[in-house]
Amino acid sequence: MDMRQLGASGVKVTPIIFGAWAVGGWMWGGADDQQSIDTIRAAIDAGVNTIDTAAIYGMGHSETLVGKAIAGRPRDQVVIATKCGMRWDDPKAEGIEPWNQKTPDGQDVVVRKNSKPASIAWEVEQSLKRLNTDYIDLYQIHWPDTSTPLEDSMAAMEKLREAGKIRAIGVSNYNVQQMQQAGKVVKLASLQPPYSVLRRGIEKEILPYCRDHDIGVMVYSPLERGLLTGKVTVDRKFPPGDHRAEHKLFTVDSRRRILTALESIRPIAARHKANFAQIIINYTIHVPGITAALVGARTVEQAQSNAFAMTFTLSTDERQVIRGAFDPLVV
Ligand SMILES: NC(=O)c1ccc[n+]([C@@H]2O[C@H](COP(=O)([O-])OP(=O)(O)OC[C@H]3O[C@@H](n4cnc5c(N)ncnc54)[C@H](OP(=O)(O)O)[C@@H]3O)[C@@H](O)[C@H]2O)c1
């Protein structure tokens, strides 16, 4: 198996990481817990060694499901990545950019970005409990909290690493300047930014910076939340609470253009006996500088099918055709 190390951390991930946002239900119109647990287990059984979750996914629910899904497996056979810094449960209501949300059981909450040292120290204990483990392999700050000195947040993360509660420190949605600041205090193992064949913003500055500073890059939403699978047809409807209904890439016109671009790469898919999702994932995990793709799945079949994307090789010409098909649609 092609294993890839996150920076100098010693944490080794498969090129596909299971993204556990959707299985938490929140912002995805709900999810069936047993199906979610079965889906996570199917991904691991199919060779995906890493699960990415976050405290905020389902307000703790996704982490709880991940804990249940990995129960009974030797702990060192699964890499757990989770995130802190998005609080919905802070009695002091500290933090910035308040965002009105509902918990999976319908309670109104306000989510705030908060990476204060005391909050990080509290959050890690909650995540360890929900995940039912005594260490987290990769602990990431979910979004920058510009109201807290970044150096203080990083010092808090380093304390957790020294205490053995986490093995490596990562960040998500940070820009180059924020990574530079963080890099003065800790050795970052990874960055988690958005990326797909449609969304290439990181190619210019972020990927070169991470390569030069030995920071692993785990990209999120590589399937553009399902659009690049070909399964989001123009007449597909999303249930209440599924954020995709309002997302600007999911307009009928945008779906139509994406489906047309996918059709143009059908001969490549046929040559590899692969579906569109597998082609797009394979393309993504071989972009120079990308360590791994975080791929969400909601069913056992999707998880198994997506894992197949680690098994074939696209030629340079095929890669160029795939990229070119989406050139006019880049956002
Ligand atoms: N750090 C951050 O701020 C951030 C933000 C977003 C995501 N993430 C991470 O990245 C992970 C992946 O991103 P994502 O979940 O946004 O999007 P994604 O991986 O681009 O898309 C996942 C969705 O596509 C559909 N899908 C997946 N495989 C499929 C297949 N084989 N056939 C048909 N449909 C398929 C499923 O939804 P349906 O079946 O319902 O269509 C699934 O939930 C997340 O789970 C999370 O861990 C991080």
Image (cartoon, grey):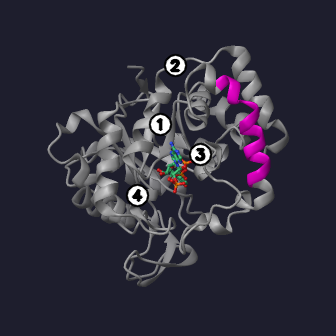
Q: Residue at x 34, y 30 (%)?
A: 47
248 is higher (above) or lower (below) than 279: below
Main SS category, magenta section:
helix
Read off the residue under disc 3.
193
Read off the residue under disc 1.
306
In the image, 145 versus 43, the foreground residue is: 43
Read off the residue under disc 4.
23
Point out the tag, 1 or 2, that comes first from the N-terminus.
1
Mark 1 or mark 4: which is in front?
1
What amino acid is at disc 1?
Asn
Label 3 C-beta lies within 8 Å of the nearest ligand 1 atom? yes
Q: Residue furthest right?
A: 328
What amino acid is at disc 3?
Pro
Point out the tag, 2 or 4, that comes first from the N-terminus.
4
Q: Which residues are magenta?
A: 255-268
Alpha carbons under labels 3 and 4: distance apart: 20 Å
